[in-house]
Amino acid sequence: MSADTEPMDTATPTDAIDYDGEFDAIVVGAGLAGSAAALTMAGEGLNPIVIERGQSPGTKNVFGGVLFTPTIRELVDLDDAPLERYVAEKRYGFLSERDETAVSMRPGEWLDEPHNDAYTVLRGDFDEWFAEQAEEAGATVITETTVTDVLRDDEGRVVGVDTDRPNGDLRAPVVILAEGANSLVGEGAGLRDHHERDEVAVTAKEVLKFDRDTIEERFRLHGEAGAAYNYFGEGAVGDAVGGGYVYTNKRTVSVGVVYRIEDAAQGQSPDEVLDEFKQHPAIAPLVRDGHLVEYSAHAVPEGGADAMPDLVQDGALIVGDAAGLVLNNGVHLEGTNMAVESGYHAGRAVASAISEGGVDDRALATYETELEHSFVVQNLEHYDFFQGLIAEDREFIFRELPRALADAEAEYFRMDRQPKEEHVQNAKDRLLEAFGGRLGALKRAWKYRKMLS
Amino acid sequence: MSTTQHPDVPTVENASIEDRLYADKYTDHEESHLGVKVEGFCTDRCDTNDCVSVCPADVWHVEDDDSVPTIAYENCLECGSCRFACPYDNVVWEYPENGAGVSYKYG
């Protein structure tokens, strides 16, 4: 992998061949975005190479637990994919220190294929399989190789990458950066800014092993049906802006917390927050006696539309987490679908630019245009108000509201010898107090009107 | 959290950090992929040790406010939290070479 003619180092097979000029595009990272880009380009007759640092695709990747598949379904046959369970139940639980108030839903429609395109998966299995699909379509995937920098020509155009292999530079007309939340190459090359710490969350997660029956009994599941539970409030992550989650896989349960690094810096470390979340009265019965098979952590870009870099720059395209394509507005917690969608559009843009004879930024700009017209940027922009709002209102949302809901419930259903009218009034008073009176309730309803719309 | 556990809430046996990391698979690498850029920032300016607070794997340790952190890089989960957390942007953070470091099986 060298531009000049010196003999190749023969330490590993990947060093032994001069790949320069062989490939139409270099994809940095074999996660969901990278493999989607490679698969799309290979499907268009191009010859892309994916460079992955892990021992196999997926070994460096972590997520909460739900893969959304509307786009991936168009690219591969999901019947062969290593899926764990489809999401048959969603639950949103507000946790105070010892209370839970939850909304749980099991629409019958989710039992039917395609199950609303939401599945729990294990990334070790899924990402490896997905990269294999790209290979079968004609892409080349090399592993245990870390891209350390981009190569530029005299005019500053990105013309390849450098890696940590001996003579490890490789040239190609286009580079797609799909390196994930820690986009060291993008930052180092000035293609994206370093995130501020209030724009990035950290997740810490355990994978706990159970027998299948235990999972199905605890979560009231059968067959391939699964559960996706999301939790908010001080019982989930204390004072922090964020939440906890519990997702069922076939024989394992993923339990984790995710909250802003800003809050971790000023409060408890992720492992301590995870300990307390697991011990919450609403969570402990779900996760007790699980056998720990893996502990993982990862950064999650949550800066929204404002934190997105220019998606096409100097012959490079940025996709997935590297471009900050994660939606978290409390109700919708999405990233996997956006990663795949961005990789797909990037791959199409490269194919169309190459077929039209030029890969300058103007030709590649269709990626940016297509992504802006897609649900990815549309959703990020629609919910962009949310991050600021939640930070300014955190005391109410994460502490006051879960407490007030639990108090009001206890009051509303109180069993004593007083007339119910009195209980109802007490419950209302408690809620109004939390909302800051009738006017406060109206103001908040107005502020948050876009959350469900 | 409440300090006294209700008898009808099951006690969850939380693994120690050591046991958590023991569950993970790592490939050794001899050189640290983590470091500090300018030791003076740690010794003279920093008194919050945010690198320690945010780390989910107990990688960063600081003896006292005037000392440079010690780094148990071999425990690193490669999450990047310290990289974002340091208010002085003083963390050296690279990927371990050739795929070394943590290898997630489940992810």
Image (tube, rainbow, N blue to C red):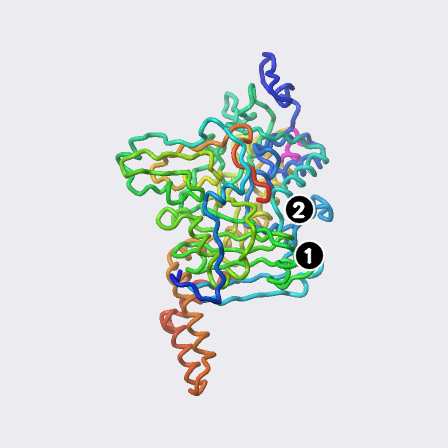
Residue that mark 2 sits on: A72
Indicate the chain on which mark 1 is placed. A
The CA distance from mark 1 to mark 2 is 20 Å
Q: Amino acid at mark 2?
A: Ile
Residue A32's x, y, as percent? 61, 42
Secondary structure under the numbered disc 2 in the rendered image: helix
Residue A278's x, y, as percent? 48, 56
Magenta span includes A278: no
Residue that mark 1 sits on: A224
Q: Is residue B4 left or right of residue A367?
A: left
Depth check: A61 or A354 in front?
A61
Give neighbour class at mark 1: few <14, some 14-19, many 20+ (Cα, 10 Å). Answer: some
Residues in magenta, as a range: A350-357
Q: What residue sits 56% from the left and 54% below the top?
A: A290
Residue A277's x, y, as percent? 46, 56
Specify the principal SS of the magenta part.
helix
Q: Earlier in the sequence, mark 1 or mark 2?
A: 2
